Amino acid sequence: MKTCKDISSLLSDSMDRPLTKRERWAVRLHLLICRHCSRFQKHLHFLHKAAERYYPTENDKHPPS
Amino acid sequence: MLGLPIENKIMDNNQLNNHRTILLRYALLQLHDEAVAEDAVQETLLAALQTGDSFRSESAVRTWLIGILKHKISDHYRAADRHYSLESSHEDEDPNEALEQLIFDGKGHWIGSPSAWKCPDHALEQDEFWRVFEWCQNNLSEQHARAFMLREMVGLETEEICQELAISHSACRVYLHRARLGLRECLEQRWFNAKRK
Ligand SMILES: [Zn+2]
């Protein structure tokens, strides 16, 4: 059985590479029963989105007056 | 835009702009000064445009450009007479090994389980959030922060990050994961679960 620690690490990997079939199943199964890791997954996507916007938003902060 | 003749075989205008954005993110996070970062990027692109080298792929160009930029950045630090090393610490020596022990217990369960974040997208519209985001990034260990930045902001592939940081693939994976764990934890405490007026 994979722990939350293992799954969180795979979830992080999934942001950087495609998971193998076996890994995908392990993750999917775990997420069905674990809301903590489900949240973690959402948070990873949020971090990705935030990081992508980080610079442009910094700049957009200075609207032409 | 740059007032340069860009009839160059290395890149067209569009590519130049893309590279410029990426280089600027990189420079900004290392130099923490917009004007200085702009200068370093400008110099990098000028240097790049003056050489006639050609490359097979976009990503080869980007790696090459980042290489030039790194020199510009270390020149800057050398000129400023500050200690700055682009050489990274040795393989797999992770300065922040303890992080996971704060987040998971011995059985691999979350210690403080992630909470549900309310309207996360709303945060992206708030200036205050970006200050927290920056603070949290600065709070990561430098190696973790760099790995995260290169991946999520600069958009390099893991392979390129390993090279850039001179670490193994598995270390790279661990750094990225720890950076995300740390950043997530920090944002949760400092923003999503923080009491604000
Ligand atoms: Zn879990």
Image: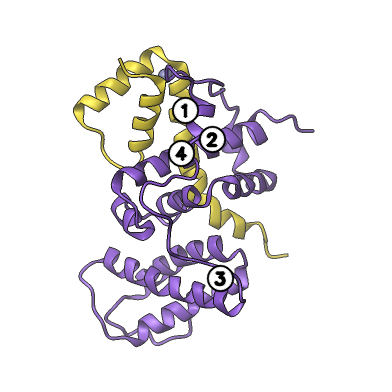
Chain colours: A yellow, B purple
Q: Could you tell me which residue is drawn at 54 percent across and 39 percent down?
A: B183
Label 1: which secondary element: helix
Q: Earlier in the sequence, mark 2 or mark 3?
A: 3
Q: Could you tell me which residue is drawn at 58 percent across and 54 percent down?
A: A57
Q: Which residue is mark 4?
A: B178
Q: Are marks 3 and 4 in contact (CB under 8 Å)?
A: no
Classify B109 as above or below B126: above
Classify A51 as above or below B182: below
Q: Which residue is mark 1?
A: A40
Q: Disc 1 residue type?
A: Phe
Distance of label 1 from label 3 (alpha carbons): 34 Å
Near mark 4 (Cα within 10 A), the count class, few <14, some 14-19 or many ≥20, is many
**In this rendering, the label closer to the viewer, 3 or 4:** 4
Is the CB of the residue bearing disc 4 within 8 angstroms of ligand 1? no
Image quadrant of ligand 1 equals: top left
Q: Which residue is mark 3?
A: B37
Where residue B95 appears, x then y in whole percent?
49, 45
Q: Are marks 1 and 2 in contact (CB under 8 Å)?
A: yes
Q: Chain of mark 3?
A: B
Same chain for marks 1 and 4? no
Q: Which mark is residue B184?
A: 2
Q: Are marks 1 and 4 in contact (CB under 8 Å)?
A: no
Distance of label 2 from label 3 (alpha carbons): 27 Å
Distance of label 1 from label 4 (alpha carbons): 13 Å
Q: Chain of mark 4?
A: B
In-front residue for pair A56/B80: B80
Same chain for marks 1 and 2? no
Is the CB of the residue bearing disc 2 within 8 angstroms of ligand 1? no
